Amino acid sequence: MTTSPTADGHLNSEPITLDKSAIVDFASRFDPQPYHLDADAAEQSIFGGLCASGWHIAALATRLVSETLLQNGHPFVEMISVSQLNWSRPTFVDEQISVRIALDASFSESPIPDTHAQNLQVDVCNGDGAVVATMSVTAAIAAEPNPGAPQ
């Protein structure tokens, strides 16, 4: 599904819902802290309930960024760097997340052949539209084909 840029030029992804099994599975493999693994322990934590690992949110946001760029005609190749990542609130069981992408400066140089570097400001939002994380990233975007180049 192709999404259209918003009036302010942002690209918005489709939402993903985080269920309990996805949260616990990710945490058991990559971030085994009690508030990501056990509902009772999570209720006693500073979060007050079972919540997704921030790394899980970052990984899903990366997926959503790549899908959204591709769906909107930006030939995403790979993430080159993440210069900033902040989590501002937890994401709980059965909450949704989506990304809102602002395209910043584009550079001609990229470490990936046949691409240019595109800076992105990414807000990761929950189903209510509240920002749960922010990311400043640089993505490699495939260079436009040269119409005069031999095929």
Image: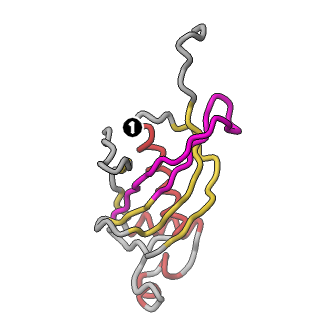
For mark 1, give the secondary structure: loop
- Residue farthest along the right direction in this orientation: 111
Identify the image quadrant of the N terminus. top left
Residue marked by disc 1: 72
* Figure coloring: secondary structure
Magenta-drawn stretch contains 108: yes
Going by the image, does 143 lie left or right of 69?
right
Q: Is residue 9 above or below residue 90?
A: above
Q: Position of residue 111 (x, y in %)?
A: 71, 39
**Residue in the picture at 49% in, 76% down:** 36
Looking at the image, residue 90 sits to the left or right of residue 139; the answer is left
Q: Quadrant of residue 5?
A: top left
The residue segment tinted magenta is 96-122
Residue 100: where, in percent of width, then height?
Answer: 40, 55
- Out of 136 and 33, give the one closest to the viewer: 136
Q: Residue at x 47, y 89 (%)?
A: 45
Seen in the picture, residue 35 relative to 80 is either above or below; the reply is: below
Q: Quadrant of the C terminus?
A: top right
Residue 95 placed where, x, y %? 33, 68
